[in-house]
Image (tube, rainbow, N blue to C red):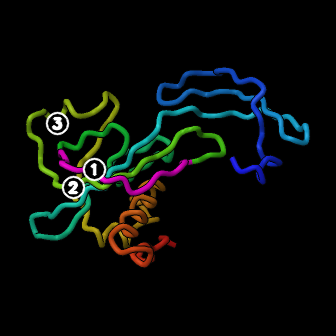
Amino acid sequence: MNSRDDHLHWREIVSQLVKRCGIFDLYESRRRAPNGTEGIFHLLKAPDWVNVVSVLKDDAGRTCFLMVKQYRQGIAGITVEFPAGLIETGYRAKTLKPIGTIAPNPAFMTNRCYTFVAGDLHLDSSREPKDRLDEQELLDVLLVPVEDLVDGIGRDPYTNSMTALALYWYQRMEGGEKGADRIRTGA
């Protein structure tokens, strides 16, 4: 922490677990600001996340992203996004290169999201598809042409913010800062 920011730093007085919710824990934290103001804040303590940008060619020779289509409970709708968390797609990568790290929502979440580019992909047929998913996970694995994602980001079904950010980092890696300018906002 920069000493010039000391006037902004809240200090924790006490924190207690309110509820365990499977994929995160809800905590109540009493904190005090340097001016003496106190407040109670609710925090989601979650494990760190991982996004994987995988690039490969489809049968027509187009450059595509390996993505997953699934129902998302929070928005009660379908999204297409980069594989994240512990999702198993049936592909294996020989290399993983880190391209970015972010705090998904530092207002109330304690975790970070790490994004990697996977290289030298190959289909791993050693496991049955049913063995690759969690109990409540239903998804389709897709190859999405790069242009389709770039043109569609911000519109259904490409509305996942971590996917938009991973695309930005991928394009920045591929073409420098100017490469990231190709992303549309979906407006």
Say which mark, if any, is on residue 119.
Answer: 2
Spatial CA distance of label 2 from label 3 is 22 Å
Crowd band around label 1 with a 10 angstrom C-alpha radius: few (<14), some (14–19), many (20+):
some
Please name the residue shown 37% across and 49% down the image: 51
Q: Is residue 69 above or below residue 29?
A: below
Please name the residue shown 56% across and 27% down the image: 25
Q: Is 98 situated left or right of 1 in this image?
A: left
Residues in magenta? 91-104
Q: Is 185 situated left or right of 32 in this image?
A: left
SS class, disc 1: strand
Q: Which badge, 2 or 3, is on the more N-terminal residue?
A: 2
SS class, disc 3: helix
Q: Is 21 situated left or right of 92 in this image?
A: right
Disc 1 or disc 3, which is closer to the eye? 1
* Marks 1,3: beta carbons within 8 A: no
Please name the residue shown 19% across and 32% down the image: 130
Where does the image place residue 109, in percent across and percent down from the top left? 59, 40
Where does the image place residue 185, in percent across and percent down from the top left? 49, 71
Residue 100 among magenta residues: yes
Task: Pick whichever, 135 or 123, lies toward us.
Answer: 123
Where does the image place residue 133, in percent across and percent down from the top left? 26, 33
